[in-house]
Amino acid sequence: MVTPLLSLTGIGKEFPNGTVALSDARLTVQPGSVHGLVGANGAGKSTMIKVIAGAHAPTSGVMRWKGEQVVWRTPGAANRAGVATIMQHVPLAPTLTVLENVFLGTPGPWRLPRARRAEFARLLERVGYAIDPDAEVAGLAIGERQMVAILQALATGAELVVMDEPTASLAEGERQVVFDVVRRLSAQGTAFLYVSHFLDEVLSLTDRVTVLRDGTVVEEGATGDYDEDRLVQVIVGRDLLEAERRRAGPVPEDAPVLLSVRGLRSPSGVRDVAFEARAGEVIGLAGLLGSGRSEILHAVYGADPRATGEVLVEGRPVRRNPRAAVAAGMALVPEDRGSQGLVGTFPIWKNISLPDVASLSSGRSLPREPAEHERAERAIADLGIVCPGPDALPTELSGGNAQKVVFGKWLYGGARVFMLDEPTAGVDVGAKADILELVRRFAAGGGSGGGSGSGSGGNVVLVVSSEFEEILAVATRVLVVREGRIVAERAAHETSEEELLMLANGFGEGGANHAA
Ligand SMILES: Nc1ncnc2c1ncn2[C@@H]1O[C@H](COP(=O)(O)OP(=O)(O)OP(=O)(O)O)[C@@H](O)[C@H]1O
């Protein structure tokens, strides 16, 4: 048997606040292999990566590198041994060139410009990719930056490249480039530890896969033995798909209209959009990338100052700016939310109660701390936020759990019209099901206790998602968006992914421009 390149046995990690992020965790990476590491938000993936990268000292366990026991006290130590870690947000120096970045911090003979250029050319050859060495990094596309990070890793002589969600912000074409490079380099003997929430990627790219759940390894095996359904089940420990496939029926005809949109246009490409939404409705905006689906959300919310048209909430016209929108009971959660909007030095409970602009502007006093605490506790339970409690800081959370806090702060802010742009982008399968369930409950008027005084007969949710399957899982009605217009309307239980795709691509009937 080959000596593993890296092996972790009995690894534990307890943080000073008492959180046990890893216990008795193990991992074996063979030379030249692509090893997938998957798990739900908060399962311990980042912690494991950081242990391997020398950024976190484990509290117990043994790590071996090429059979020798090692203790890496700093990222530099791991790096010198041959481990390069590419984190999700690639920390490159924007004002330096590609070439300068690639050799940044790499000791060796690369100080001489000629030697550097020759080495750079050799690295490009290895990855089979072309990029201008003299281009400034600030001007590069995200995919190209990713490639610079890979070249940087290779320049340090890495034998194991750890990639944390490398494709999270990449377009499809750029993803393919990353896959090709990973395959090519692994064929040349470089090993990869590939962390991703995109299970299709893990299934197609990796040789073996390790599944973490609640800080321990629940399974490890040859990737070929898994399909997506099975992997999901192992990750979350339950079968979610059934709930996700359940379709919602239409809301009653006599449900009150909460939101009316008339003659909405904007130079950003919204062209005469009109629709109404009744209490209890989840309206999916299904369209291809560039169809104008997000622009419509932004225009409805008043985030696009150039947009014109009428928006009424509960029959009252809303002035076209975000402040007025919030005061009228609207909330928009943008796609690029990340941990955006979270104040790192505020505990979760305070972060969740921050956007209560509606109650501020209506002259009601700020809820006192016990109430806020309770609300945060409810959010933590409802959203399944993995954290020590409402007093934890956002910086103590995993990426996906921080996103759920961002969600919570809008969801619990008392809105009646809730607009979500790609609500499950970047969250794991378990969180995804939780979020979709929450959206349904919110629309039905339960859960978040929304409603600013006008009864709790339900709320309205507008959802933009590029996954039509997801739209169908959560929506009661679907508006198909194409070239900035609503071209068709379907009840969710009467359509299919295939039909939506046809319509979004401009096939089939259309013309239903005024969907009501
Ligand atoms: N610095 C820290 N201090 C305290 N607890 C932490 C710290 N970093 C992470 N944790 C906790 O450790 C657990 C594991 O988090 P980790 O970031 O490793 O999860 P993850 O699997 O990477 O999740 P995600 O997919 O959401 O990024 C979580 O409960 C998290 O709240």
Image (cartoon, rainbow, N blue to C red):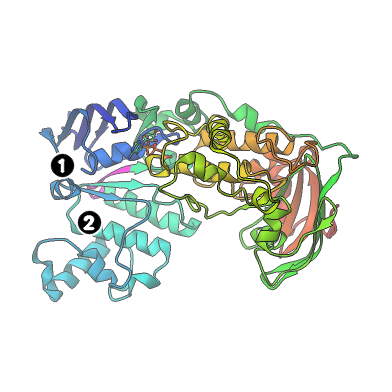
CA separation, marks 1 and 2?
22 Å
On screen, residue 192 above or below 67: below
For marks 1 and 2, give the one nearer the viewer.
1
Where residue 60 appears, x then y in whole percent? 21, 27
* Mark before the other along the chain sequence, 1 or 2: 1
Apparent side of residue 148 relative to residue 273 in the rendered image (left or right): left
In which quadrant of the rendered view does residue 17 lie?
top left
Label 2 amino acid?
Answer: Leu
Mark 1 CB in 8 Å range of ligand 1? no
Which residue is more in the foreground, 434 or 18? 18
Where residue 383 appears, x then y in whole percent? 55, 34
Label 1 amino acid?
Answer: Arg
Would you say residue 265 is visible in this rendering? yes
Circle 1 is placed at which residue position?
A: 73
Magenta-drawn stretch contains 95: no
Where residue 502 appears, x then y in whole percent? 72, 52
On screen, residue 269 above or below 296: below
Indicate the secondary structure of the residue bearing disc 2. Answer: helix
Where residue 125 appears, x then y in whole percent? 26, 63
Q: Which residues are magenta?
A: 187-193
In which quadrant of the rendered view does residue 110 lie?
bottom left
Which residue is more in the foreground, 349 or 246? 349
Would you say residue 33 is visible in this rendering? no
Quick one: label 1, few (<14), some, or many (20+) residues within 10 Å? some
- Ligand 1's image quarter is top left
Residue drawn at (41%, 35%) of the image: 42
Circle 2 is placed at which residue position?
A: 154
Residue drawn at (17%, 54%) of the image: 157
Residue drawn at (66%, 67%) of the image: 304
